[in-house]
Image: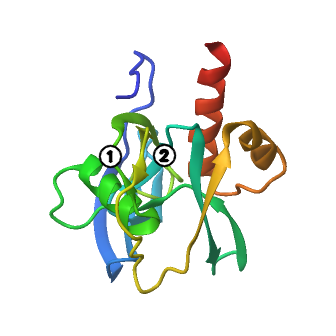
Amino acid sequence: MATKLPDDPAPWRVLTSEYLVKKFWHTVRVERVELPTGAVLPEYFVTEFLPWVNVLAVTPDEKVLLIRQYRHGLGQVHYELPAGTSEAGESSLEAAARRELLEETGYGGGRWSPFMVLSANPALQNNLAHTFLAEDVVPTAPPHPDAGEDLRLHLVPMGELAALLDGGDVVQALHAAPLLKYLLRRGRR
């Protein structure tokens, strides 16, 4: 929950709202909104997504599970956390994260805890990315990625993680931030 301060700006008032596209991976609405100042923005576009889940998974011998896959938006391959989206009707984000980790890596078990909640772009998107810390995960089944995924699993020793981040090998900000937070916490111990 975000901290609320007495002098926070007031929310905008939605005057009209219309869906331009409504598909699972691409839902966009346009709204006419009135700001607290009285100014009216005739077209403000918002992209809707279900909540996203990321897993910062660490093995008993302190290796971090990272995947590499081609990302068509950038046309590049980088390191990422195992991640995905929750599914319509899925009531537990942790269950969605456990499902994604198993599907993409074949790992499971361990101790799980909520770790970080981020927004990719709070100005234009309505969803949050929920990162879970999964410690002491072990292989439990063969991976079975979705048909649109071509993944390579890498078990990265803890001592190499900072260099990957510093070298620009993790460009997905919603994945870099939890990795940096994890390294910061470890450094404070």
Q: Where is residue 151 in the image (x, y as percent from the top left)?
A: 56, 74
Q: Is residue 182 above or below residue 31?
A: above
Q: Nearer the viewer, residue 87 or 11?
A: 87
Q: Residue at x 51, y 52 (%)?
A: 123
Q: Nearer the viewer, residue 12 or 152?
A: 152
What residue occupies the far right of the structure in this picture?
A: 167
Type of residue at label 2? Ala
Query: Which mark identifies residue 57?
Result: 2
Q: Where is residue 110 in the image (x, y as percent from the top left)?
A: 35, 40
Q: Position of residue 6 (x, y in %)?
A: 40, 15
> Is 157 on the left-hand or right-hand side of 117?
right
Type of residue at label 1? Gly
Q: In this view, does 48 lie above or below 60?
A: below
State the residue position of label 1: 109
Looking at the image, is mark 1 or mark 2 earlier in the sequence? 2
Cα separation, mark 1 vs mark 2, equals 10 Å
